[in-house]
Amino acid sequence: MTVSVETGKGPAHAAHKTGTMSPREQGVLWEMEKHFWTSGADNAQATTATNAVMVFPYPPGILQGDQIWTHLRERTGWRTVVMAERRVTRYRDIAILTYRVSAEKPDVPIYKTLCASTYLNDDDRWLRVSHQQTAVN
């Protein structure tokens, strides 16, 4: 049996076809992400897909769908949020935001974490389909 191998070309599948985002598009996503932290669970829910998945430091761990909103009602509304080391990666209709955050609110120690949020552009509307936080000291 003979196998033909193409050389000189990169992979043809979609994961290797990255795109760029205009500064305006990036600004929209970063503003959504900031409001995810500061504007409460109702705002976060309005910008999140119905069956999204979120991963938080244990507990609560891995949450999906309606489980997310019970957890976030108690843990949103941060007074200040500073996002550093911000990066945006786009693959067609998917954008991934990665960043380091320092969040603060009254009577709670400053919360520091590494984050990744994945958004899907669904009919010209960005929706969060996943979010992960990894606590750092």
Image (cartoon, rainbow, N blue to C red):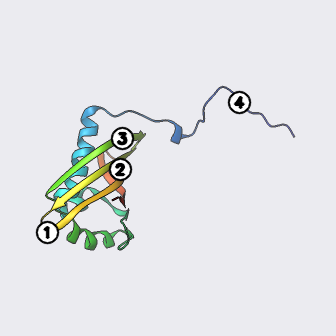
Relative depth, front residue between 29 and 106: 106
Which comes before the other along the chain, label 4 or label 3?
4
| Amino acid residing under circle 3 | Val
Label 3 SS? strand
Q: Is residue 121 visible?
A: no
If you read the primary sequence from the N terminus, does the residue marked by circle 2 or circle 3 appear first?
A: 3
Q: In which quadrant is the C terminus drawn?
A: bottom left
Kindly report the distance in space between the C-alpha atoms of the residues bearing marks 2 and 3: 11 Å
Q: Earlier in the sequence, mark 4 or mark 2?
A: 4
In the rendering, which numbered label is found on residue 6? 4
Residue at the farthest right position:
1
Tell me which amino acid carries mark 2. Tyr
Q: Nearer the viewer, residue 4 or 33?
A: 33
Q: CA distance from mark 2 to mark 1?
A: 32 Å
The location of residue 10, given as percent across then percent down, is: 60, 31
Q: Nearer the viewer, residue 63 or 101?
A: 101
Residue 68 pos. (x, y %):
31, 69
Crowd band around label 1 with a 10 angstrom C-alpha radius: few (<14), some (14–19), many (20+): few
Mark 1 vs mark 4, foreground winner is 1
- Measured as percent of width and height from the top left, residue 87 is found at 35, 41
- Residue found at the very far front of the displayed protein: 137
Occupied quadrant, residue 133? bottom left
Q: Which residue is mark 1?
A: 107
Left or right of 15: which side holds 24? Answer: left
Check disc 2 and report the residue beneath it: 119
Q: CA distance from mark 4 to mark 3?
A: 31 Å
Compared to 114, does 12 lie above or below? Answer: above
Tag 1 or tag 3, which sits nearer the N-term?
3
Is tag 2's residue or tag 1's residue first in the polypeptide sequence? 1
**Mark 4 falls on what kind of element?**
loop
Residue 28 visible to the viewer: yes
